[in-house]
Image (cartoon, rainbow, N blue to C red):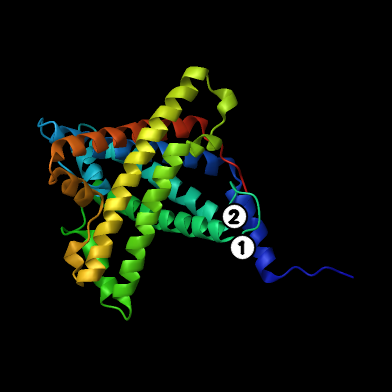
Amino acid sequence: MARHNSPLSNLEQPARRAASHPWIEKLARLGFAAKGIVYFVVGLLAAQAAFGTGGKTTDSSGALSTIVTQPFGKFLLALVTIGLIGYALWRLVQTIFDPEHAGEPTKAKQIAQRIGYGLSAIAYSGLALTAIRLILGNPSGGGNSTQDWTARFMAQPFGRWLVGLAGLVVIGVGLAYLYEAFKAKFQRHFNLNLMSESERQWTKRLGRCGIAARGIVFGIIGLFLTLAALRQNANEARGLGGALAALAAQPFGPWLLGIVALGLIAYSIYSLIEARYRQIRHP
């Protein structure tokens, strides 16, 4: 009996070929490097604030604003922007084809991972657009984007419940990061055979510190989202910069902020190692 291809399969094959193009891997690796640069700036500014040498608590958009004000800033930010676009494309490939995981795609864990990849693709696409605006000299308006988006969701039917659910999910992501850091499961994503023993040890140390720091930050962001839902007040929501500022406001705040800031710097170096040694499987 003749086999008839569905319209979906006819579209899927060209999409797979495009996703398997060598340039996708190059852009993905550049994306890991760009993410590392952004986290380095965020961590460095937070560390300076914690240790009283200037700096401030800021988010990824603030890091881009800092980059563009440096010598040759627009050129540097253009390179970072290309990387952010590459990272968003790679996350999109992971969302659609799930190239790094085996098994049935209907499993709850894999569905959750692919949703996470999709949200990451959206977030880094937005960050790339912010970078483009900065390069063109047209930065986005002021305000807290996290609070703005929270207010928009809460204005919708069942919006308060959705924000609360999002907060719990983000807390869960933070706990998952802490578990990943403890178990050092991130090592399975690396071409360990291409690394020296010293490189493997430092990757493990930096990964544990950096991913744990991200877990703490995600947990704080999720907590504030949950509070925003419980109190029906979008102003309670916080993003990355707000989470770091909240740490600084606690007893022993400079110490807490300094530890997390150093963890984010460790994560930035870990991301640069990912750019070189991560296994990138094609769909």
Q: Residue at x 36, y 67 (%)?
A: 165
Mark 2 residue type: Phe
Classify 10 Å Cα crowding around label 1: few (below 14), some (14-19), many (20 and above).
Answer: few
Q: CA distance from mark 2 to mark 1?
A: 13 Å
Give the answer, above or below, for where 162 lies relative to 40: below
The x, y position of residue 16, in whole percent, is 63, 53
In the picture, the quarter occupied by the N terminus is bottom right
Q: Is residue 30 visible?
A: no
Mark 1 residue type: Thr
The x, y position of residue 52, in whole percent, is 9, 32
Q: Residue at x 60, y 60 (%)?
A: 107
Q: Which residue is denoted by mark 1 in the rendering?
A: 106
Checking the image for residue 97, the label placed there is 2
Residue 181 falls in which quadrant of the image? top left
The x, y position of residue 222, in whole percent, is 30, 57
> Which of the pair 277/250 is nearer the observer?
250
Residue 162 falls in which quadrant of the image? bottom left
> Which of the pair 140/100 is nearer the observer?
100
Checking the image for residue 39, the label placed there is none
Labels in figure, total: 2
Q: Residue at x 28, y 64 (%)?
A: 226
Tell me: 12 left or right of 117.
Answer: right
